[in-house]
Image (spheres, rainbow, N blue to C red):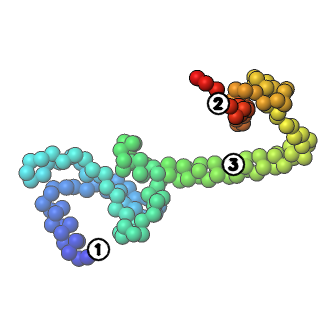
Amino acid sequence: MSWWSGVWRSVWSALSREVREHVGTDHLGNKYYYVAEYKNWRGQTIREKRIVEAANRKEVDYEAGDIPTEWEAWIRRTRKTPPTMEEILKNEKYREEIKIKSQDFYEKDKLGKETSEELLPSPTATQVKGHASAPYFGREEPSVAPTSTGKTFQPGSWTPEDGKRQSQ
């Protein structure tokens, strides 16, 4: 951030009557502010704001997860009150427990599949020869009409007429 932007920010905050109230700081160093609804110098009503001042000032240094989910919910107005540090730590601990439990479940499931494969006999291969609803089921001769059974298509049989042309 250049020194011009710092000067501009201080001039703007002096003119806008925007009063920031520091609400909290998270364990990553981000600071959170609340600006109540106010009227600007033109008489317009500006609605309330919730602002985060990131620990990393540069946008290129920001990564997903740099703001805890509880604070993000407060910023997006899905929760009314800002989170406490105890609540954030409790939720972090809960997430770690869920990760451990899911890994244990995955390992047990993997082990269960290995043992069940050893206990079960291998499936026998069966050949499907047509379908019971097909008109040629059980017969080897082709039919005059085309037939279709699921994934297979059997065209109808065709025999050429003798060389003489029939009169119409």
Q: Looking at the image, which residue is at 82% across and 49% down?
A: 111
Q: Residue at x 84, y 30 (%)?
A: 140
* x and y percentages locating residue 88 in the rendered image: 50, 52
Mark identifier at residue 1: 1
Three-letter amino acid code at the position of disc 3: Lys
Callout 2 amino acid: Arg
- Sooner in the amino-acid sequence: mark 1 or mark 2: 1
Q: Is residue 167 left or right of residue 105?
A: left
Quadrant of the drawing holding the N terminus: bottom left
17 relative to 163 in the view: left or right? left
Given residues 152 and 10, the one toward you in this image is 152
In the displayed structure, does residue 30 sit left or right of residue 18?
A: right
Going by the numbered disc 1, the residue's amino acid type is Met
Would residue 51 be seen by someone viewing this image from the given angle?
yes
Mark linked to residue 101: 3
Q: CA–CA distance between discs 1 and 2?
A: 94 Å
* Residue 116 place in picture, x, y as percent: 86, 43
Count of all numbered marks drawn on residues in the image: 3
Residue 155 seen in this snapshot: no
